[in-house]
Image: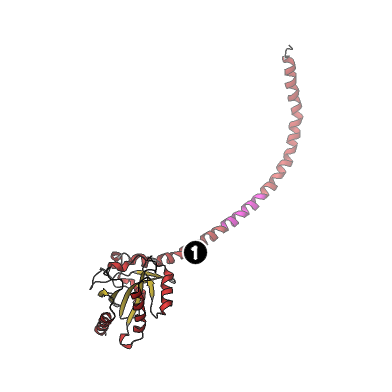
Amino acid sequence: MRRACPHLAFICVAALGCADVPQNSARDAQNPARDAQNPARDAQNPARDAQNPARDAQNPARDAQNPERDAQNPERDAQNPARDAQNPAQDAQNPDSGYPPGPYGLRVGEIIADLVFARAAGPVTLSDLRAHHRLLLLLTAAGWCRTCAANTERLVSWSTRPDLAGLGPVVVLFQDADFQPPSPSYADAWAARFETPYPVVTDAAFQLGAYLNPAQESMALIIDAASMRILSSKGFDPALTEAEVLRQLDALR
């Protein structure tokens, strides 16, 4: 086995150290060239910094989206009447909404809340339906109900009668022909079927059920369109309902 010679190790280290001296000069000699690259490297900083305005320029674009986002607020807020209509207490505190302030109730003599119904064109409220009328007649109906179909046709003839001027009939569908909650488009199909000159809407949650006798399949809710007070809540009878409507119209003239 050979023994390592410490003198040789010293010589090797010394030789490397000596050889490093000229290499340092050569390396340092390269420093000007390396440093000469610094301006080029630094010269890239303006280009890099020049990107900052472009990056910053995106901030207005990003901020410019805020109005678009905020512009959606009116649409979201436009849904508030529908939401608020289900909150009589809240509506009672907002008399400037155009709808009569509460308190609201379910019985004859009380003010009905601004209920929200549906049709293919979008939601429709009692505020919408009462416009340009003295009296509202809400007639509940179902797609499976033959009597309801006949009553729908009867209201078509009522719409053209001079002695019933000021009456605003509205058919409110709470079920379709399959006993299911109707879709908004079902209201349009019903209106097209009977060629109604008055609105047909859907009440999938059957909100009117709280105001009417559930034992009757076709109910008539008569409302003063100005005060939105409930004047009558009975089953629809062609003769009796017609007499009640005429009486109420005379009282409002």
Using residue 192 as the reference point, say whether residue 228 is left or right of it: left
Amino acid at dot 1: Glu
What quarter of the picture does the C terminus occupy?
bottom left
- Measuring 26% from the left and 74% from the top, which residue is drawn there? 234
Residue in the picture at 28% in, 67% down: 210
Q: Nearer the viewer, residue 191 or 122?
A: 191
Quarter of image, res 12: top right
Measuring from the top left, give residue 134's x and y in whole percent: 30, 81
Question: Is 52 within the magenta?
Answer: yes
Q: Is residue 93 visible?
A: no
The crowd level at tag 1 (other Cα within 10 Å; few <14, some 14-19, many 20+) is few
Q: Quadrant of residue 191?
A: bottom left
Magenta highlight on residue 124: no
Rendered location of residue 202, percent (x, y)? 38, 70
Q: Nearer the viewer, residue 230 or 80?
A: 230
- Residue topped by disc 1: 68
25 versus 48 height, above or below:
above
